[in-house]
Image: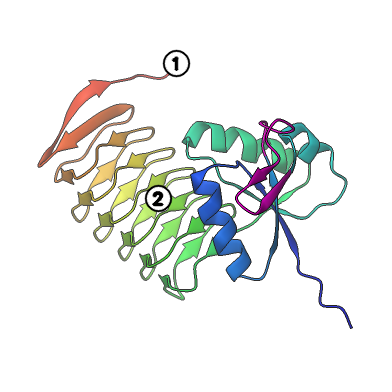
Amino acid sequence: MTNTKPIIAILGASGHGKVIADLAEQLGYAVSFYDDSFPEKTALEHWNIVGTFSDLLSNTSRFEVLVAIGNNEVRKQKCDELMQHGFSLATLVHPTATVSQYAKIAAGTVVLAGAAINAFAEIGHGCIINTSAVIEHDTKIGEYSHICPNTALAGAVKIGKSCWIGIGSQVIQLISVGDYTLVGAGSVVVKNLPANVTAFGSPAVVVKSDKKS
């Protein structure tokens, strides 16, 4: 009797893609990479790159897909196109992550090693909850946001869509961060941040506004 592993297509042959592929193998998947560097580039470490994004969209096999692209807006664009073509977005949770039975994690999100997601937290579509990030109780994270390694979000924090919360940052309880906002590495957020800004420091202050049309 053959034991065929389920296939997962990973879009994005990058350093982040390596981390996702490693996790996918631990979870029992067989990995196929797709990247627009193909055919000039045909492998990422020992994993084969088998085609471009267009090749993936035209593939008639509807296996699960994970978009391993760090840029939030590009990740959203690719996920939207994949879903429009009938693909299912995988949700991958590392075996060493701790996820409450009462937490909610939407499709296309990855939760990496050592992360903790506590009771009644909600994670939107296509997010990256990176290594050793802490998402406390009742915290809500909007779609396509990236919570970087060793970041701590206290209870009932609200993070908007397509946010970037930089490595080692801390957000105290009950704080809101608006859509498309970037929080620089090592920041401590103690006041609400509006949408479309860059903020950093301890305490974090707005240093740039980038209004979207």
Q: Amino acid at mark 2?
A: Ile
Dot 1 falls on a residue whose secondary structure is: loop
Residue assigned mark 1: 213
Q: Position of residue 82 (x, y in %)?
A: 71, 41
Residue assigned mark 2: 141
Q: Residues within 10 Å of mark 2 (few under 14, many from 20)?
A: many
Q: Earlier in the sequence, mark 2 or mark 1?
A: 2
The reply to whether residue 109 is visible in this rendering is no
Dot 2 falls on a residue whose secondary structure is: strand
Name which residue lies at 28% across and 56% down. 150
Which segment did they paint magenta?
Answer: 35-49
Task: Decide whether residue 47 is among the magenta residues.
Answer: yes
Q: Amino acid at mark 1?
A: Ser
Direction bottom: furthest residue: 1
Depicted 205 relative to depicted 101: above or below: above
Q: Quadrant of the C terminus?
A: top left
Task: Decide whether residue 86 is among the magenta residues.
Answer: no
Residue toward you, 68 or 180: 68
Q: Position of residue 75 (x, y in %)?
A: 55, 38
Q: Position of residue 66 (x, y in %)?
A: 62, 50
Name which residue lies at 81% across and 71% down. 4
Q: Main secondary structure of the magenta part?
A: loop
Q: Please give left or right for residue 213 compared with residue 152 in the image.
A: right
User: Which colour style is shown?
Assistant: rainbow
